[in-house]
Image: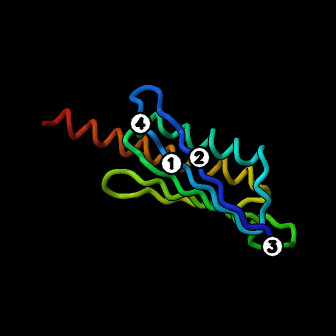
Amino acid sequence: MDRSIAREISLNRSNLKLMDIIIRTDGVALDEKLREAVMQKIGRVRLYAPDAFRARVQIQRVTQKPSARQFRVGVLYELRGNDLVAEHYAREPLTAVDLVADKIERRVRKLKTARLARRMQL
C-alpha cells in the first residue's frame, strides 16, 4: 500500500505571507505531476483568501475496482475563524483535485463577498 506525505511552503507574492500545503496519500503514488497539480490548484485559492495559513489535502484510493468513486480527495483549508472542508470522489485523482479545488474556491469567494458586504454596511 502506497502512503506518502509531501509538504511545501508556498509564498504569496502580493503580501509576502507563507502558506503551508500538506499532501497525504493513501493507496496512491504521489508522483510529480499529481503534486504539482495539487500545489497549483489549491494554491490558486490564495487569491481570494490571503490570510489562509495552511491547506491539508488527503488523496485516498477508496476501492481497487474501477468505479466513479474510486478516489477520494479531501481538503481542509485553515483560515482565521472557521475552517473550510470539501471532499469529492472521482474516477481519477486529478479530476477529484480539480473538482474539490473549485468547491473550496467557491466557498472562499462566498466568504470574502459576505465579509466585504458587512464591511460596507458599517
Q: Residue furthest top?
A: 14
Res 81 quadrant in image = bottom left
Closer-to-camera residue (64/107): 64
- Which numbered circle lies on residue 88? none
Disc 4 vs disc 1: Cβ atoms closer than 8 Å?
no
Disc 4 vs disc 2: Cβ atoms closer than 8 Å?
no
- The answer to which of marks 4 and 2 sits earlier in the sequence is 2
> On the image, numbered disc 1 is attached to which residue?
20
Amino acid on which the number 1 mark rests in the picture: Asp
Disc 1 vs disc 2: Cβ atoms closer than 8 Å?
yes
> On the image, numbered disc 4 is attached to which residue?
17
> On the image, numbered disc 2 is attached to which residue?
8
- The answer to which of marks 3 and 4 sits earlier in the sequence is 3
> On the image, numbered disc 3 is attached to which residue?
1
Res 109 quadrant in image = top left
Q: Residue at x 31, y 43 (%)?
A: 114
Q: Position of residue 37 (x, y in %)?
A: 70, 42
What is the count of numbered marks? 4
Helix, strand or loop at mark 4: strand
Helix, strand or loop at mark 1: strand
Q: Position of residue 49 (x, y in %)?
A: 41, 40
Disc 3/disc 4 C-alpha distance (Å): 36 Å
Q: Residue at x 72, y 68 (%)?
A: 26
Helix, strand or loop at mark 2: strand
Disc 4/disc 1 C-alpha distance (Å): 10 Å
